[in-house]
Image: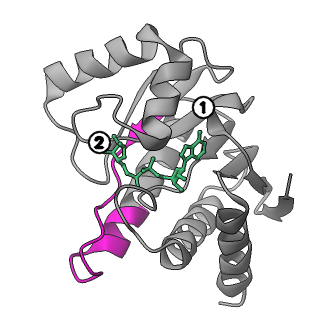
Amino acid sequence: MARFETEVAGTRLVLVQGDITQQEVEAIVNAANPDLTPGGGVSGAIHRAGGPAVTAAAARIRQERGPLPTGAAVITPGGNLPARYVIHTVGPVWRGGTHHEPELLAQAYRSCLSLAVQQGLRTLAFPSISTGAYGYPIEQAAEVALRTVRDFLRENPGQLEEVRFVLFSAADFRAYRAAWARVQGV
Ligand code: AR6
């Protein structure tokens, strides 16, 4: 499986092709819907693998706080996953790029990173948020994702040991690898 590793301000930044439900990190991120129901895509897979502990905790948060706004994040236990926690965030639905999609996507990544640091977590894995059912073009999403993570790591040096992007397909991995080359050039 394809893998790429670099370093940003003392944190390992890893791109890997794979299944996020199998990652041995402290927390994995879920590309959730505002109601925090299992749904399909990566969210369905995470709820299936994590089991009722994940789905029930997410339902409780939904009941207490209402729908999760786009760009926000909450944390639940990881249930049966190798990861101890799941951080659920809602990315933007792509509506042509003129509805603040880049800002909202960046906010989703930042919310997850901040929550992980707040909780004292050291290793975190992201899927490619918004690039499935929500339709965000992957080349653009990858660039926002990587620039946002790079900037956060520079602003919070030494807080995280590893941030990993787990890309489901070889094509998605290549898109992130190419986006990293563009982001680095800036
Ligand atoms: N591991 C890693 N990545 C995965 C996995 C997996 N096991 N499964 C799918 N992906 P999506 P979104 C990739 O649609 O666009 C849900 O129904 C997938 O190939 O899961 O943010 C929610 O309930 C794609 O590249 O998330 C929401 O309603 C990426 O994960 C909605 O979809 C994201 O695709 C959220 O849409």
Q: Earlier in the sequence, mark 1 or mark 2?
A: 1
117 relative to 164, above or below: above
Question: Is 113 situated left or right of 68 in this image?
Answer: right
Q: Any mark on residue 33, and which?
A: 2
Q: Which mark is residue 27?
A: 1
Point 56% across, 61% down: residue: 152
The quadrant of the picture occupied by the C terminus is bottom right
Residue 38 image point, x, y percent: 35, 29
Instruction: Point out the stretch of residues depicted in magenta.
Output: 87-106
| Location of residue 114 in the rendering, given as x and y in whole percent from the top left corner | 48, 46
Relative side of 138 to 102, left or right: right
Whether tag 1 and tag 2 are in contact, CB under 8 A, the answer is: no
Which residue does the image show at 75% across and 52% down from the upper left? Answer: 17
Disc 2 on helix, strand or loop? loop
User: Residue 139 in the image: x percent, y percent?
Assistant: 55, 78
Looking at the image, which residue sits at the far bottom?
A: 185
